[in-house]
Amino acid sequence: MSCGGNCHCNEHRLEVKDHSKVLLYEPRKTKIIKSQRLGSRHHLIRIEAHTDHEPGQFFQLTVLGFGEAPISIASHSKDYIDLVINPVGSVTKEAIRKKVGQHLLLRGPFGFGYPMHYFYNNNIILVGGGCGVAPLKGVMDYIAQYRTHYRKVDCFFGYRSPYDSIFTKDFKKWEKDKVFDFTYAYSQAPPKFTGKIGYINGYLEQSGLNPGHTIALICGPPPMMLSVVESLKKMGFNDDQIWVSHERHMKCATGMCGHCMIEGKYTCKDGPVFRWDWIKDAKG
């Protein structure tokens, strides 16, 4: 996987499929076919959509009269798109009020996701924190569909409490069917809780996983991702084995507004997924 340290984002475009063509530049009316609560804070909305997208990309969700917000894709299907929404603003709060059969507006997909075919024949480690688990669910859907292309897959997911867990039923089924292995940790567990308490990077370090032929994909709050990268480095991982999904306050999704710039790189266009050696020295 090493390239001598001379990598840049152009390599990203060369290594992944050509999915840089945005399918929907203007908002398109899409029907809600599923709506449900996830955990204590999040909400899943499934949109009927026949589009080609990669794990890690995102759509711009529009609610007329309220604005739009970038939402990561939490599925991998040509028939629908799962969006996991944390209702913290006017757009997202209004979006989860919509019922099955009603419509939302979408444009996208935008950005570059995880180059899944570049990881063929490797072990995969997925590390997610909070709502950062949602984009990794899209990665998991992809791997489950092409399971023979990958070796062992270990998932390390951290939440504030068990009540904040998302996709619990899906993960239990995958674990029962031995598709993936799971480790969960909770930083604010309730009294008498018998599971793992603390931050997920500690349990990652204790796992004893070997970095040979292994790729780590991380998504979560920036402080959590930095801690996980430090843990992976202690375990012997190289920078070019680590991929992060960077969170920035994206607005236009086309690189025009500059809100999401990271020292010359736009999260919405050059990311949101970056290999660690491409952005490790970026500030801001």
Image (cartoon, helix red, strand yellow):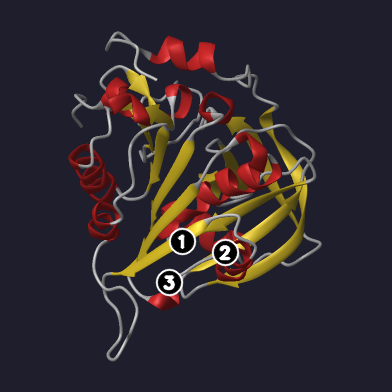
Q: Quadrant of residue 230?
A: top left
User: What is the CA distance from the residue labelled 2 to the residue labelled 1?
Assistant: 7 Å
Q: Are marks 2 and 1 in contact (CB under 8 Å)?
A: yes
Which of pointers 3 and 2 indicates the residue nearer the eye?
2
21 on left or right of 68: right
Foreground residue among 91 and 185: 185
Q: Quadrant of residue 168?
A: bottom right
The residue to which callout 1 is attached is: 182
Against 42, is 5 above or below?
above
Mark 3 lies on a secondary structure that is helix
Q: Position of residue 251 (x, y in %)?
A: 45, 35
Foreground residue among 165 and 185: 185
Q: Position of residue 76 (x, y in %)?
A: 67, 44
How packed mark 2 is, by other alpha carbons closer than 10 Å (few <14, some 14-19, many 20 or more), is few
| Quarter of the image where the N terminus is located | top left
The residue to which callout 3 is attached is: 164
User: What is the CA distance from the residue labelled 3 to the residue labelled 2?
Assistant: 19 Å
Against 92, is 214 above or below?
above
Foreground residue among 44 and 103: 44
Residue 73 seen anywhere in this rendered image of the structure:
no
Three-letter amino acid code at disc 2? Glu
The total number of labels drawn is: 3
